[in-house]
Image (cartoon, rainbow, N blue to C red):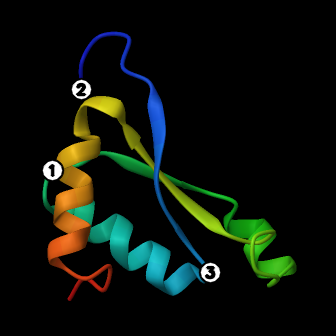
Amino acid sequence: METNDKLVLLETFENNIDASMARQFLEENGIQCMLTNENVAAVYPIPNIGEIRILVFESDFDRAHALLDEAGNQPK
């Protein structure tokens, strides 16, 4: 993380399980991240309204994106 680094949207998921797995995978690979909209997704399981978002620091975006691409957005 760099000084004045801002959070940016990395990916969206339709359910808590996939989002939590992606967050854990990124954190295991040294990427700090956070989930948003977890409660909204549970209450309103409607596409585009209840999407869970993973945010990462802008300086980690490229590496985080590459990690999720390699894992096919389905970390194991």
**Residue 2 sits in quarter:** top left
**Residue 64 sits in quarter:** bottom left
In the rendered image, the quadrant that contains the N terminus is: top left
Closer to the camera in the image, 61 or 23: 61
| Nearest-to-viewer mark from 2 and 3 | 3
Disc 1 residue type? Gly
- Sequence-first tag of 1 and 3: 3
Q: Which residue is mark 1?
A: 30
Estimate the x, y position of residue 70 in percent, counting from the top left. 14, 75
Q: Which residue is mark 2?
A: 1
Estimate the x, y position of residue 32 in percent, counting from the top left. 30, 45
Q: Measured along the vertical axis of the image, is residue 34 above or below residue 1?
A: below
Closer to the camera in the image, 71 or 36: 71
Q: Measured along the vertical axis of the image, is residue 76 above or below residue 22?
A: below
Disc 3 residue type? Glu
- Sequence-first tag of 1 and 2: 2
Closer to the camera in the image, 39 or 18: 18
Q: Which residue is mark 3?
A: 14
- Sequence-first tag of 2 and 3: 2
Estimate the x, y position of residue 54 in percent, counting from the top left. 48, 57
Q: Residue at x 44, y 24 (%)?
A: 6
Q: Secondary structure at mark 3?
A: loop
Estimate the x, y position of residue 20 in percent, counting from the top left. 44, 74
